[in-house]
C-alpha cells in the first residue's frame, strides 16, 4: 500500500490515470468505516483502478478545538486496518488550520480532480466537507460519480466513533469491540515501572507508555493478547493479562497499564508493544497482603487460559 501526503505525488507513484476514492477521518476504522472502505475497494476492483482513501493526521478536531476526542487508534493502526481491507493507496493529509479554511469546492478541485484524478467517490451517510461543511451534492461538480453509503446499525443505532468512546469509558468493552468489529487495542513503548512485578510478585509485567491522545478502557483487570511490533518475535500474538489500574494494594495514585505476557521471558524495554482487550476479568481492589494478591494474579492467568489467543 502506498502512503503519501501529496495528491499528485501519490498518483505519480501509483501511476494511475483515474481512481475510486473515499474520504474520512476513519478514527478506529470501525464497522461503519469498514463498510465504506469495502464498497470503495469492491468498486475499484470491478473497474480495474486503484482504491484510494483520503484521511487526515492529526484528527481535525484536535486542531480546531481544545477539547479534542481521544483517538481510538494510532495512525499506524489506521493504515494497517485500511491495508487489510484492500486499500491500494492512502493520501494522509496533514490537517492544519490552512486546510480547514478551504471550501469544499477548493478541496475537490485541488485534491480530487487535479491531484488524484478521482472519477468515483464514496462518502459516509453523515458526510460534510470544508469550511462551509458542504454535503455530497457539492462533490458532483468535480467527481463524475458520488455515492453516499448508508449507516451501519448495531442494536438499532448507527455505529460511530463517539459511541465507541462512550462504551469504553463506561466499561462496556463487549459493546465497544462489537462496534469496532475487532478487539480494541493500544500501542506504546515498553518502559520501566516500579519494578514490583517480577522481583516482588513473580509475575513480570511490561509497562506500556500509551500516548495521552489515546482513548482507553475503564480501569479494571482484563484478559488481553499482546504482540511485539518490532525486533525478534514481532507479530506473534501471545496470551496476556493486563491491569489498567492505580495498584491500590501499593497505594498507587496514578493509572498505569501493565501487561503480563504469559509463557514469555525476555528483555523488551524500549520495544513497541500492542495490547488488545478481549474481556474484563475483574475490578481492581486492595488485597490484604502480597500472598492474597499473588493468588489472585494466578487465578487471573488461569481464567485467561480458558479463552482463545
Image (spheres, rainbow, N blue to C red):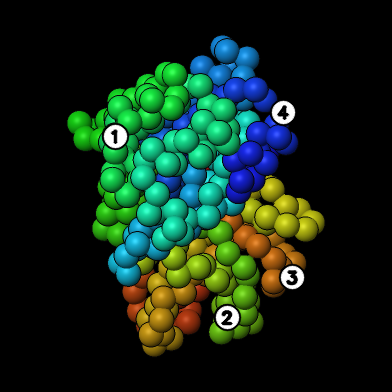
* CA–CA distance in space, label 1 to label 4: 30 Å
Pick whichever, 45 or 234, lies toward us: 45
Q: Residues within 10 Å of mark 3 (few under 14, many from 20)?
A: few
At horizontal 32% and vertical 54% (from top left) the residue drawn is 165
Q: Which callout, 3 or 2, points at the residue further toward the start of the chain?
A: 2
At horizontal 74% and vertical 70% (from top left) the residue drawn is 267
Q: Which callout, 1 or 4, points at the residue further toward the start of the chain?
A: 4
Left or right, 155 with reference to 105: left
Pick whichever, 184 or 285, lies toward us: 184
Judging by the rendered image, the residue that carries numbered circle 1 is 135
Q: Residue 56 carries which label?
A: none
The C terminus lies in quadrant: top right
Q: Residue 193 carries which label?
A: 2
Residue, far right: 232
Secondary element type, mark 1? loop
Secondary element type, mark 2? loop
Q: Which mark is residue 267?
A: 3
Question: Can you say whether 28 is above or below 269 in the image?
Answer: above
Q: Residues within 10 Å of mark 1 (few under 14, many from 20)?
A: some
Secondary element type, mark 4? loop
Q: How crowded is mark 4: few (under 14 residues within 10 Å), some or many (20 or more)?
A: few
Amino acid at each position: 500500500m502506498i502512503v503519501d501526503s501529496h495528491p499528485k505525488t501519490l498518483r505519480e507513484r501509483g501511476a494511475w490515470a483515474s481512481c475510486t476514492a473515499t474520504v474520512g477521518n476513519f478514527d478506529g476504522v470501525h464497522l461503519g468505516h469498514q463498510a465504506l472502505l469495502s464498497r470503495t475497494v469492491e468498486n475499484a476492483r470491478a473497474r480495474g483502478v486503484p482504491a484510494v482513501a483520503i484521511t487526515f493526521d492529526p484528527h481535525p478536531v484536535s486542531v480546531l478545538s481544545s477539547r479534542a476526542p481521544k483517538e481510538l487508534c494510532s495512525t499506524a493502526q489506521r493504515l494497517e486496518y485500511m491495508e487489510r481491507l484492500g486499500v491500494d493507496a492512502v493520501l494522509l493529509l496533514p490537517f492544519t488550520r490552512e486546510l480547514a479554511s478551504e471550501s469544499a469546492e477548493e478541496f475537490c478541485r485541488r485534491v480530487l480532480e487535479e491531484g488524484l484524478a478521482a472519477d468515483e467517490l464514496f462518502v459516509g451517510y453523515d458526510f460534510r466537507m470544508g469550511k462551509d461543511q458542504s454535503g455530497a451534492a457539492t462533490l458532483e461538480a468535480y467527481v463524475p460519480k458520488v455515492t453516499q453509503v448508508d449507516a451501519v446499525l448495531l442494536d438499532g443505532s448507527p455505529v460511530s466513533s463517539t459511541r465507541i468512546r462512550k462504551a469504553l469509558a463506561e466499561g462496556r468493552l463487549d459493546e465497544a469491540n462489537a462496534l469496532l468489529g475487532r478487539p480494541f487495542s493500544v500501542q506504546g513503548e515498553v518502559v520501566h515501572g516500579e519494578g514490583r512485578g517480577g522481583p516482588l510478585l513473580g509475575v513480570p509485567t511490561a509497562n506500556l507508555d500509551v500516548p495521552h491522545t489515546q482513548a482507553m478502557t475503564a480501569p479494571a483487570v482484563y484478559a488481553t493478547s499482546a504482540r511485539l511490533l518490532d525486533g525478534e518475535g514481532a507479530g506473534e500474538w501471545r496470551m496476556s493479562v493486563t491491569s489498567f489500574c492505580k495498584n491500590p494494594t501499593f497505594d498507587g495514585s496514578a493509572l498505569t497499564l501493565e501487561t503480563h505476557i504469559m509463557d514469555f521471558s525476555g528483555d523488551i524495554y524500549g520495544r513497541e508493544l500492542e495490547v488488545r482487550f478481549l474481556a474484563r476479568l475483574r475490578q481492581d481492589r486492595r488485597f490484604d497482603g502480597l500472598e492474597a494478591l499473588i493468588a489472585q494474579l494466578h487465578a487471573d492467568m488461569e481464567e485467561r487460559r480458558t479463552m482463545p489467543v
